[in-house]
Amino acid sequence: MNKSALIFVCLAFPLAAWAADAKSDVKSKGKPTKPAATAPSTTASAPTNARAAVRASKMRGTDMGACRKQADDKQLRDVEAKQFMVSCMNAK
């Protein structure tokens, strides 16, 4: 019985605080508050930049695969493998 009550109290207080916090964000008319307007991001919205980011992440993945294969070929483990991976990725 005591364990159940303790679990209930531990879960009820954070949920009550979260619900009270969510209610404080609502205006008196019942509409949610709007965040302040910010300048649009030019780096993430441009399709060419997004394509370049995807292409770069794919290249990084292939570089990591090549470095991991070299570490496996040298039979490096744990710390030595991590150090080798860092130096290999920095060289590329």
Image: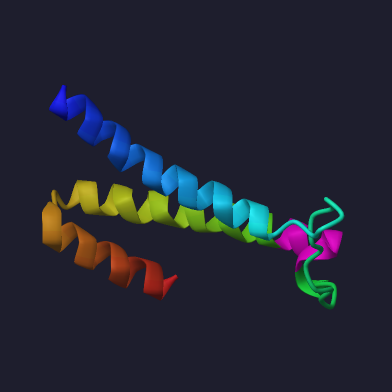
Let me know if residue 5 is in the magenta part.
Answer: no
Q: Quadrant of residue 91?
A: bottom left
Q: Residue furthest bottom?
A: 39
Q: Quadrant of the C terminus?
A: bottom left
The majority secondary structure of the magenta stretch comes to helix
Above or below, comparing residue 6 to residue 70 in the picture? above
Q: How many marks?
A: 0
Residue 22 % position (x, y): 62, 52
Judge left or right: residue 56 versus residue 11.
right
The answer to whether residue 77 is above or below residue 33 is: above
Q: Quadrant of the N terminus?
A: top left
Q: Position of residue 26 (x, y in %)?
A: 75, 56
Q: Does residue 17 appear left or right of residue 75 in this picture?
A: right
Using the image, determine if residue 86 lies above or below residue 54: below
Q: Residue at x 56, y 52 (%)?
A: 20
For the residue pair 83 and 72, the one nearer the viewer reads as: 83
Residue occupying image coordinates x 12% and y 51%: 77
Residue 34 or 25: which is nearer the viewer?
25
Percent x, y for residue 7?
25, 33
Horizontal side of 70 relative to 32 (left or right) equals: left
Magenta extent: 44-52
Q: Looking at the image, which is closer to me, 22 or 86?
A: 22
